[in-house]
Image (spheres, rainbow, N blue to C red):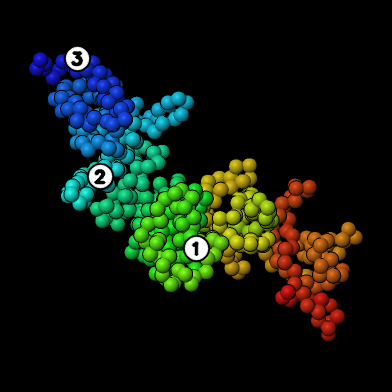
């Protein structure tokens, strides 16, 4: 009909019919992409209103099958993400579930296709990434990251794209905001290991962190395989065998083929002679702090003291000062914490009802200054109730009994700041008390236990 460009109404009405047709084609068991390609060619010269609800509907329809559509990138470039409406940046809802905005979906889909690359040799199934297209797309990705900080995945794909073009200068800073949000996902640490491919120690730590997380075993097969190879290269044969046997158990359970690499390793002497451990959790825990420090090293550490340890719930009551105290879970960060331990902790936001989430925690030397712990010395003022005080520091009845203290005995030790709920006030209580007997003076003096 050769309608003029300003005759938008007919084209916009066509958009709805074309979109429904594309959606319909993609419901088939075997999608006829020749028809989808033909429809795309037909509409390339249509004069739709841009942006508009109808034009966004066209995008949603063709986007539906982007994973297996070879012409998706051409379509996305023709459609042009600058034509997204303000409504397209909002979350949607379907069957009571919240869905990612179509804008975020669009940027993710295009990023995936860039990373997938274009076929350079169909016979060998070889692909190459178009570095020029990636460099043109990155500023647009930067804009959506800046304008929509709640979108979780664009920073991840920015990091992947920077790696794809060999740009390591900004990859870590681009990835960190996303990684912090998703730090409990093993694949975050797998990508972090890829970022630090030139630093074997940090890469090793990232694998440890990834494997330390609670993840279904079928998802960890490839990560364990990579880590087993690294362990073997370090002659850590027992640890390598432990990882390999985890893989074997998972693959057997799923009915999967073991693969050539696993089969070859099983035939080698180092594997046959190695001892299998129940797990490698101690190894993971030994190295995870190094990995976590990468993720959070630009966040401040706060020095706190352990006031109480609940080993059943794996929680610690901590105190930093009279203004900040509470509890947090320690199981993923510390082994065998004790009352009085000084910790460097990176908190994940403010506490809720006294319970805090943390990013990192590590033990510190006793000599570190802390508002919550102090040394004390002096004579015991023993009370009839069985407890006592030394220079204002509370000595519990159990401590009096264990050390067989008498009134006026001279002792010294360490005390922790503690909130006395019954009196609604702060005070100091001893958690460590040492003594020795000075025979020349006939009194007990502090010393090392």
Mark 3 and mark 1: span between their CA atoms? 66 Å
Q: Do the residues labelled 1 and 2 touch (CB within 8 Å)?
A: no
Q: In front here: 206 or 7?
A: 206
Q: Which residue is drawn at 25% across and 44% down?
A: 114
Q: Which residue is drawn at 63% across and 59% down?
A: 305
Q: Residue furthest left?
A: 2
Q: Where is residue 92 in the image (x, y as percent from the top left)?
A: 40, 28
Q: Which of marks 1 and 2 is in front?
A: 1
User: Can you tell which mark lies on residue 10?
Assistant: 3
Quadrant housing residue 74:
top left
Per the image, label 1 sits on a secondary structure element best described as helix
User: Can you tell which mark lies on residue 3?
Assistant: none
Quarter of the image with the N terminus is top left
How many numbered marks are there? Answer: 3
Mark 2 and mark 3: span between their CA atoms? 34 Å
Mark 1 and mark 2: span between their CA atoms? 37 Å
Per the image, label 3 sits on a secondary structure element best described as helix
Q: Name the residue tied to disc 2.
A: 114
Q: In this view, does 129 lie above or below 434?
A: above
């Amino acid at each position: 009909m050769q309608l003029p460009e300003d005759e938008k109404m007919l084209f916009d009405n066509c958009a709805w019919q074309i979109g429904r047709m594309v959606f319909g084609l993609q419901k088939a068991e075997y999608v006829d992409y020749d028809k989808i390609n033909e429809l795309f060619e037909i509409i390339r010269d249509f004069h739709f209103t841009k942006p508009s609800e109808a034009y966004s509907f066209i995008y949603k329809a063709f986007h539906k099958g982007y994973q297996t559509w070879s012409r998706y990138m051409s379509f996305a470039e023709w459609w042009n993400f600058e034509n997204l409406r303000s409504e397209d940046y909002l979350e949607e809802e379907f069957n009571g579930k919240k869905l990612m905005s179509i804008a975020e979906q669009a940027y993710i889909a295009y990023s995936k296709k860039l990373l997938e690359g274009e076929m350079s040799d169909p016979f060998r199934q070889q692909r190459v990434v178009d570095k020029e297209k990636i460099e043109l797309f990155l500023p647009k990705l930067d804009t959506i990251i800046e304008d929509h900080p709640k979108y979780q995945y664009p920073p991840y794909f920015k990091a992947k794209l920077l790696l794809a073009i060999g740009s390591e200068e900004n990859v870590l800073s681009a990835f960190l905001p996303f990684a912090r949000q998703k730090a409990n996902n093993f694949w975050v640490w797998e990508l972090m290991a890829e970022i630090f491919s030139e630093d074997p120690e940090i890469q090793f730590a990232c694998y440890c962190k990834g494997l330390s997380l609670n993840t279904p075993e079928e998802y960890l097969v490839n990560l364990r395989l990579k880590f087993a190879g690294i362990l073997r290269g370090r002659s850590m044969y027992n640890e390598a065998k432990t990882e390999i046997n985890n893989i074997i158990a998972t693959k057997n359970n799923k009915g999967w083929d073991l693969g050539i690499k696993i089969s070859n390793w099983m035939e080698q002497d180092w594997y046959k002679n190695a001892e299998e451990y129940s797990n490698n959790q101690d190894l993971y825990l030994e190295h995870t702090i190094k990995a976590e420090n990468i993720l959070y090293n630009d966040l401040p550490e706060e020095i706190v003291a352990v006031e109480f340890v609940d080993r059943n719930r794996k929680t610690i009551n901590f105190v930093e000062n009279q203004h900040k105290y509470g509890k947090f879970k320690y199981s993923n960060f510390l082994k065998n914490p004790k009352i009085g331990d000084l910790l460097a902790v990176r908190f994940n936001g403010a506490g809720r009802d006294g319970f805090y989430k943390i990013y990192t925690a590590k033990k510190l030397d006793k000599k570190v200054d802390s508002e919550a712990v102090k040394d004390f010395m002096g004579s015991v003022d023993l009370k009839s109730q069985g407890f006592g005080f030394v220079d204002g520091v509370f000595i519990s009845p159990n401590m009096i009994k264990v050390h067989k203290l008498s009134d006026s005995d001279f002792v010294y030790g360490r005390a922790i700041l503690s909130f006395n709920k019954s009196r609604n006030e702060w005070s100091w209580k001893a958690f460590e008390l040492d003594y020795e007997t000075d025979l020349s003076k006939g009194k007990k003096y502090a010393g090392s236990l």
